[in-house]
Image (tube, coloured by chain):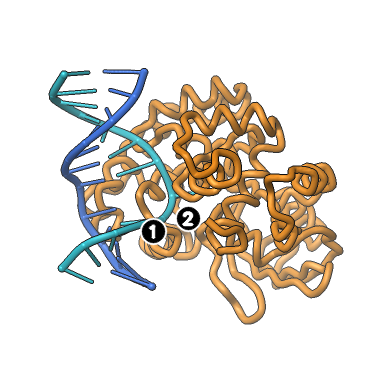
Chain colours: A orange, B cyan, C blue
Amino acid sequence: MSTVGVQQGSFLAPDFHLQITIESGQVFGFSKFKEGYQGSFGGISLKLWQKDERLFFESDAHFSPREIELHLKHYFDLERNLSPLYTLLEQDPKIPSVLNRIRGLRLIRQDIWEAMACFILSSNNNIKRIQQIWHRLAKALGRDGKHFPNFEIIADSNEAFLRSLGLGYRAPYLLKSARLVCENVDILKKIDRASYSEAKEILIKFPGVGSKVADCILLYGFHKMEAFPVDVWIERILRKLYFRNRSAKNLLSFAQKKWGLLGGYVQQYLFHGARTGILET
DNA sequence: TCCCAGGGATGAC
DNA sequence: GTCATCCATGGG
C-alpha cells in the first residue's frame, strides 16, 4: 500500500524508554525536537515522542502508519521480553540496584552501513563530536541533507573533503572502508549470515575497524547479541565491579563467558550507567 | 593550558 | 605475541 502525505500514529510500547535509548551512545543521528526526537532509518525520516507507555510518530514517508509501526518495533527491538535481563541484573550482587533506574533501554537495529561508518568515526572520539560529524556528513552528502550518506556517495568523495568536515585522521579509514564495501557489495550480507566469530574476522580487516569497533558494528548494526564492546567506560566499570579496581586482561572474554547472549544488553546498561554517573566509577 | 573522548595502525622488541 | 606512540578535533 502506498500512501502520500504526513503519516501519524501511535502504539503501546511497554518497557521502552525512548530518551534513554536514543541518548545511550549507540546511535548518533537523532536530534531533539520539542518533547521528542527527529531521526531517520531505513530511508524513512520521522519524528518520535513518548507519553507514558505510548510511542507517537509522524513521518512523510510513503508507508502506512501500520507499516511504520512495524518498522519501529523492529528498529527498537520492542518484541524482546526484557524480564530475563532484569532478573540477571537484579540477581548479580556486584551490580548496584540503582541500575534499575534505566529500565526501558533497548538495543537499536541500526542501518548497517551507518553503524559501520559511525563507529569507524568513534575511535578516540566523544559522542557529541560524533553527532556533529554525523550531521555534517548528512548535510553535505546525504539525501535531502538529513539522511546518513550511503557507502557509494562516501566512496565517491575524497579525503580532503572528509577532513574538512572534521573527521581528522579517521577520514582515510572511512573513505577506504566505503570503497572496499563498494568493491564487494555482498560483503555486508555475508557478514550478516556469518557467526559472530566469523563476522568479526571479516570486519577487522576493514581500515579503522579493530576489536572494539567491530563489536559495536556487530551489536548495533548486525544485532549479534554476544558482541560486547569494551571501551574506556566499560573497562572502568568492570574493573571496579569485578576486579577491585585492579588491572584486568581480556575483559571481552570475561564478559562473554559470564553473560553470553545477554552480554550486548548488559554492556549497554553498564555503559549508560557509568557514563551518566548512575553507576559510580 | 591540559585532559579526555565508545581506539586503531604502526613499529620496536 | 605485547606494548608505546601517534593520530585530529573540540568540549570541559
For this view, does A231 lie left or right of residue A141? right
Across and down, in percent, residue A245 comes to 50, 44
For this view, does A168 lie left or right of residue A221? left
Type of the residue with mark 1: Leu
The part of the image, by quadrant, that contains residue A242 is: top right
Helix, strand or loop at label 2? It is: loop
Q: Earlier in the sequence, mark 1 or mark 2?
A: 1
Q: Quick check: can you spot residue A85? A: yes
Across and down, in percent, residue A194 comes to 60, 22
| Residue hosting label 2 | A148
User: Residue sitting at 39 percent across and 62 percent down?
Assistant: A129
| Residue hosting label 1 | A137
Residue at mark 2: chain: A
Across and down, in percent, residue A216 comes to 52, 41
User: Residue sitting at 70 percent across and 57 percent down?
Assistant: A99
The answer to which of A54 and A261 lies nearer the viewer is A261
Q: Quick check: can you spot residue A60? A: no
The answer to which of A16 and C1 lies nearer the viewer is C1
For this view, does A10 lie left or right of residue A190? right
